[in-house]
Structures are given as C-alpha cells and as structure tokens.
Image (cartoon, coloured by chain):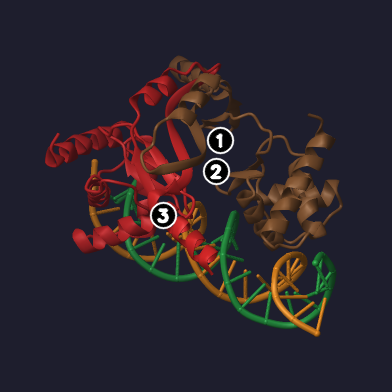
Chain colours: A brown, B red, C green, D orange
Amino acid sequence: MEIKELKETVRQLFTEYLRVNGHRKTSERYAILDTIYSIKGHFDIETLHDLMLNEEKFRVSRATLYNTLILLLDAKLVIKHQFGNSSQYERSYNMETHHHLICTQCGKVTEHHNEELQELIAASPMKRFQMSHYSLYIYGICSKCATQKRRNAKINKSK
Amino acid sequence: MEIKELKETVRQLFTEYLRVNGHRKTSERYAILDTIYSIKGHFDIETLHDLMLNEEKFRVSRATLYNTLILLLDAKLVIKHQFGNSSQYERSYNMETHHHLICTQCGKVTEHHNEELQELIAASPMKRFQMSHYSLYIYGICSKCATQKRRNAKINKSK
DNA sequence: GTCAGTGCAAACTTTTTGCAACTAC
DNA sequence: GTAGTTGCAAAAAGTTTGCACTGAC
C-alpha cells in the first residue's frame, strides 16, 4: 500500500472511531495521526513534537499529544512500548508484526521478523484471558557493541 | 529448592560478583538482596522500600535501592520490566521463564507458562545479535474485567 | 586512613492535571 | 450556546545527582 493511501485509510478509521465514541474531529488530531503515519519506526513524544513543528509546521502542546495518543491507542492505530526512559510509540495499522532486539549496551532497538514465532504466540492458549496484542523484547548485545567489546578485551590483554 | 537455601545461594553469587567487580560488601546490599528473594512476583522501588521497612525493619534510602538494583541487574540476579508507570523488578535466579499477561483495563499482571514458546524464542535465529534474555508481554482483557464489561453492556442495554 | 557507599535533599525528566480561552458541533 | 478540546503552567511521580558523613577494607 502506498503511503498516501495508507494515510487516507487510517484517517477514515480514526474518523469512524471519533464518531462512534463521540469525540470531536479537530485539526490537531488529524495532524498528529498524519505525522505518526509518516514515521517508519519508533518515536517518543519529544520527537513527535519536534517533527510536527519542523516538517509539518504544525504546533501542538505536549498535553494534546498525550491526549491524542490515548485515543489512538484505544483506536488501535498506535501501539506503545516502554523501553528506554520515555514511552515509545509506533504506528500499528497495516504493520507487519515484529519483535524488538534491544541492545543492553548502547540501547539501540532493531526489528526482528519471525513468522513461526508470531503464529505460535498468537495461537498460544491462555486461560481466562482475551489477548489483543503482544510485545516481545529480546535483550542482548548488538554486533557493533560485541565488536567493540572484543576490541577492548584485546587491548586490555596486550597491556 | 527451599527458600533459605535459595537465599544462601544468591548471597554467595552476589558476594562473588562484588568481589570480582571490586565493590564493597555492605549490609544494605545483602538486606536488599534478601528482601527481593522473599518476594515471589514483581515489585517496584516503592514496594521494596516499604517491605524492607515493615517486614525486615531495615531502612535504606531510595538512592541506595536504585544503586543496588543496578548491581543486581548486572549480576543477573534480578530482571527489570517496564510496564505500568514505574519500573518493575523481579528476582531471576532459579526462576522458571514465564511470560506476562497484562490487563489493559485494570493493569493486573499475571504469569503465563508455555514451554514450547520458550524454547522457540530461545532457539530463534537472530543475525548479528547475542541474546541474553527476553520478555514477552501479552496485552488483553483479564477474565474479571471481561465479566465486568459484559455486565455493564447488559445494564446499558436494559436502560 | 582512604575512598566507595550511604542518606538526604535538590534537581531533573516525563507525564498528568487544573484552568482559561477556543472551537466543533 | 454548550461542552469537548487545546495550550499553558503548575503539580505530580519516578529517577538521578551532588555533597557531607559513614564504614568497609
């Protein structure tokens, strides 16, 4: 799906969500949704705020960002992660499910695809619990940090 | 393993960790470790602080709790979660791997065991990434909240 | 005796809240 | 016109930091 088409679709979904739940259609809300669906990876409130200001020349308060994100989470158009210090968000409509590799050394987050795993998690039988979605965070050392570590070990050895 | 035996083991592991890394063996550190290994589920700093004060009659500052938890994380005797508002911690030595079911309605967290899933995740091939551990958070509605929801829906209907 | 570790309070960061002004309906 | 929404600033909540004092080595 093209980006323009995608944005149109989520905009419609959001409109429907707002209608059903009796919320108002404000320009801020649509501008936020639009910006979010221009971002490929994760983002936090700070980044979103700056991006809207610089790229879209649209200024919204942080309070509105927090408020709107609650709606978007509820509308299932965005998902929330909590690695790092601040909450991270990510667009979720039409996104392939993916898992997160988090480097405990440098904090870098990369995506990891594994269909077999996805299916097994989705099909995992849970007593008395209705799953809506899930997050898998895999912690470890990324290749860059591993190389660095080996290099440091070598230096220390030769000292 | 009995709880007393477990505490003794982790105490030895921690001692070894402190020795190797040139840290001092303080009564605070051992008291914290001991309290943590008395807690079965998750806890946050606040809870740990109160528990030490009330159960063990041991007063430590929050700063020391944060400092010590960094050591315990590094020593792999504790793992950290980030659901909810504050960071959650959990003892990790000799613990069965488990996944977390998080109710998006009431925030309640329960454990979920699934060996097949565990093994598949542990064996999942990842390019250029050395996994150390992982966390699987499954979001949804717990049975209690689901019942509540059905009840509310019924009331609204009959209105 | 020395310096890592501790407690305390202040600082900082992220998120929430109260309120006046605004605007979608 | 009314009530939901916004922006702002203040407050709250969680975590980190600076500094004087303490105690492990």
Whether callout 1 and callout 3 share a subunit is answered no
Question: Which label is found at residue A38?
Answer: none
Pointer 2 local density, CA inside 10 Å: few below 14, some 14–19, many at least 20: few
Between circles 1 and 3, the one closer to the viewer is: 3
Q: Which chain contains the residue that carries disc 2? A: A
Q: Are marks 1 and 3 in contact (CB under 8 Å)?
A: no
**Which residue, given by chain and number where applicable, does mark 3 sit on?**
B147
Q: Residue at x 32, y 36 (%)?
A: B22
Describe residue D21's horizontal placement relative to residue A140 as left or right.
Answer: left
Q: Residue at x 69, y 33 (%)?
A: A94
SS type, badge 3: helix
**Residue farthest right in this picture:** A57
Question: Which label is found at residue A107?
Answer: 1
Q: CA distance from mark 1 to mark 3?
A: 40 Å
Q: Does residue A52 lie above or below B158 as drawn?
A: above
Q: Residue at x 28, y 43 (%)?
A: B24
- Provide residue B68's location: percent of width, then percent of height: 35, 47
**Residue farthest front in this picture:** B158
Evaluate whether residue B82 shows in this view: no
Q: Are marks 2 and 1 in contact (CB under 8 Å)?
A: yes
Q: Nearer the viewer, residue A26 or D9?
A: A26
Quadrant in which residue A27 is drawn: bottom right
Pointer 1 local density, CA inside 10 Å: few below 14, some 14–19, many at least 20: some
Q: CA distance from mark 2 to mark 1?
A: 7 Å
Q: Quadrant of the N terminus of chain A?
A: top right
Question: Which label is found at residue A84?
Answer: 2
Evaluate whether residue A112 shows in this view: yes
> Which amino acid does the dot numbered 2 rest on?
Gly
- Provide residue B57's location: percent of width, then percent of height: 20, 62
SS type, badge 2: loop
Q: Residue at x 44, y 31 (%)?
A: B134
